[in-house]
Image: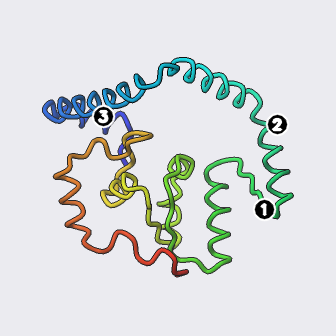
Amino acid sequence: MKNHAQLSQEFNANEPRVNWHDETLWWVRQKRDKAANTLPEWEALREAASGIKYHTLSNLNAYLQQFEANAQANGVTVHWAADAEEHNAIVHTILKEQGVTRIVKSKSMLTEECHLNPYLSRHGIDVIDTDLGERIVQLADEPPSHIVLPCIHKKKEEIGELFHEHRAPLLVNPIQKC
């Protein structure tokens, strides 16, 4: 598997694509700025959110313990994992105990960072991402290129070709336990 530096070097070698990508990102940024400008208190809200984030990260241990206590009080089992390997093993064990061979999964940076999809696939569990951008990169067998816009590097024509190539339904009866 290629690392980020290799992939970015290949991407940057294609100047027309880089120009298209830059234009696309600026278009997204302009939409965001237009929406932000409709809120006169935008900067104050940003500062408040930043303060909340800083406070939460500075006190994360206490918040996680509080979450665990509240979750357990409501009958929820909480699992702690030291690293990606342990995280994936816990998820796999739960799925295996339930006889699950296919799951649908929403967008999750944690599972992306832990490489949960390929781990489960190696263990015979089919994963179908429900977020459209995540599903697109999943079908393309690529990592997401952006935290919010996972397939921003793909042109609509490429996405159309990808869907044509994978004519099977994007979701196969997600309610059914497989």
- The residue type indicated by label 3 comes to Ser
- Relative to 79, residue 82 above or below: above
Numbered mark located on residue 62 in the image? 2
Task: Give the Cα distance between marks 1 and 2.
Answer: 18 Å
Q: Position of residue 163 (x, y in %)?
A: 24, 63
Type of residue at label 1?
Val
Q: Regarding mark 3 in the picture, which secondary structure is present there?
A: helix
Residue 92 - label: none
Residue at x 31%, y 27% (from the top left corner): 30
Q: Which residue has dot 1 on it?
A: 76
- Element assignment for label 1: loop
Of discs 2 and 3, which sits in the foreground?
2
Q: Where is residue 37 shown, x and y percent of the image?
A: 40, 22
- How far apart marks 2 and 3 lie (CA) works out to 39 Å
Question: Could you say whether the residue bearing mark 2 is in a helix, strand or loop?
Answer: helix
Decide which of 60, 4 is in the foreground and name it. Answer: 60
Residue 61 x, y percent position in the rendering:
79, 36
Horizontally, is 18 left or right of 54 in the view? left
Crowd around label 3: few <14 · some 14–19 · many ≥20 (10 Å): few
